[in-house]
Every structure is written in structure tokens, then in C-alpha cells.
Image: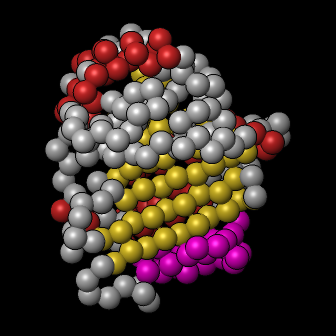
Amino acid sequence: MSNLVSGLSFSLCFASDFEDQDMAQKILEVFLSAPASVRPKKFGAFQPSEKIQETSTLLDVLTNKAGNKAGVRAGSLILEHSKSCSYQVQWNKTNRPTFSFISGHLMFSAMSKGTVLDDFIALVKQLAVVLSPAYGEIRSMAVKNWDAPMNLLIRLPDVPPVSIYGKEYIAHFGEEKIKAFPFGTVEQVGEGYWVTAHPSVLEEVPSARRAEVRSYFGEQSFMADGKWRYTEGSAPDFDLAFSIV
């Protein structure tokens, strides 16, 4: 754990089928309409080696038309704006329930250029508005435990500067409790809520504040202080039937 990197990351987890053509199209539309400073220019299934020209080509890669057969199926799309800013879209269908996910990073070295950081965060917010993730977060890769394994079927990760709670967590925690969050700001984004526990996404949430947030929503719902080998906890009842083959 804790392979520290001088950059910012986001992760969005979905109880949604990315193999579905309509969903895949929505994902691509959001990325390709992003601000120019963070908009993808290249793509590939595993390496971003081709220039983006036709949306239909990206759609075929993401839904993996050529590679998917009966049984285990998967899709991967890497999108790159530059070496300092790139994204991954991933889905898997196996015999175990699995979330689809979108992740991305922006290196600190790119943040001195105009509104790049604001544009990056705006893109994450637009993905949340249009695609309705079950959970999302933004956190610095330069702080300890940023890369701790995530298992939403058991617990949430420890508290990041920005959390996105989708409908499953709204039902789990209670909408009024989320809206009354006393330790930061709360903004509705599509069907979910954008909850800020620390004013700077570039910094770690102080340990005392993380403890307050965990206590507020319920200790059993969160991993804590670098621990991640939990075998039990409190989590929503996610419908991931789409991911099982």
C-alpha cells in the first residue's frame, strides 16, 4: 500500500452495466464534451495509442464487441489527455458480483496551467450527474493509504476529501442525514450527493475529522486508519445481478 504519487485521483463505482450500448454511449459523451484542458485525445483497450476520431470506434472497444463470448466477459477503455491526465473505464462479468468503474488521475505538475484542476473536478461532477454512480471519491495520491483496496460490499474506504453517495448510500444512511452533514458541504449531483469533508482535495482529511465523519454515519460502514482486511461491516444491498454470468 501507499505507493505515493504526486497527483490527484478519482474513482467512481457503478451498479450499472457498461456493456449496455446506451450506457457506454453516455460515458463517452461526457468525456468527449469535457473542457479542452482535460478532454481525452487518445484511446486504447489497454494502452492509449490511437488518436480519437470516431466515437463508434471507442464504443466498440468499451463494449468489447470483438472479444466477448459466452461466459466471462469484460471491457476496458483507456482515455488519455496527456501523460499527466488520463482515465480508465472498466467492467467485468464473472461468477461473482462486480462493480463497473471509472477512474482517473491528474498530476500535480499539470495543475499550474489555467483552470485544469477546476476542469478536472467539473468532469468528475458531470460524470456523477449523468451516470449516477453508487459511490465515488476524490483523493490525493500523495497521502498515505490512498491506494488501500476498496470493497464496497463490506465497507466504504476511509473518508476522502470528496465523497459521492449514490441512491444505495442515500437509502443506507438516510437522505436527511446526508443533507444534514455537519462537517463540510453537501451538494446534490444528479441522483446522488457530493459531500466535502475537507476544503482541499489536494490534502488528507485530518484524522480527527475522519473519525467524526465515521462516527456520524456509523463506524461499521467505513474502513479506518489504513486497515482494509475487514471481513464484516455495514453496507447497502447492491443489485449487481447484471455482472454475474
In the displayed structure image, the side of residue 211 where residue 240 appears, left or right: left
Point 79% across, 44% down: residue: 110
Find residue 44 and report its image quarter: bottom right
Task: Check if residue 63 falls in the magenta segment.
Answer: yes
Q: Is residue 40 above or below residue 136?
A: below
Rendered-image quadrant of the N terminus:
top right
Please provide percent x and percent y for residue 177: 26, 18
In the displayed structure image, the side of residue 97 where residue 189 appears, left or right: right
Q: Is residue 198 above or below residue 240?
A: above
Q: Is 95 or 193 nearer to us in this picture?
A: 95
Task: Check if residue 57 falls in the magenta segment.
Answer: yes
Residue 146 visible to an observer of this rendering: yes
Q: Is residue 100 above or below residue 151?
A: below
Residue 129 visible to an observer of this rendering: no
Q: Is 219 or 18 nearer to us in this picture?
A: 219
Please provide percent x and percent y for residue 68: 37, 85
In the displayed structure image, the side of residue 85 where residue 104 appears, left or right: left
Q: Is 70 or 134 nearer to us in this picture?
A: 70
Point 64% across, 73% down: residue: 47
Rendered-image quadrant of the C terminus:
bottom left
In the displayed structure image, the side of residue 143 where residue 174 appears, left or right: left
**Magenta span:** 41-64
Please provide percent x and percent y for residue 222: 33, 30
Point 37% across, 59% down: residue: 100
Please provide percent x and percent y for residue 12: 44, 48
Q: Is 231 or 179 nearer to us in this picture?
A: 231
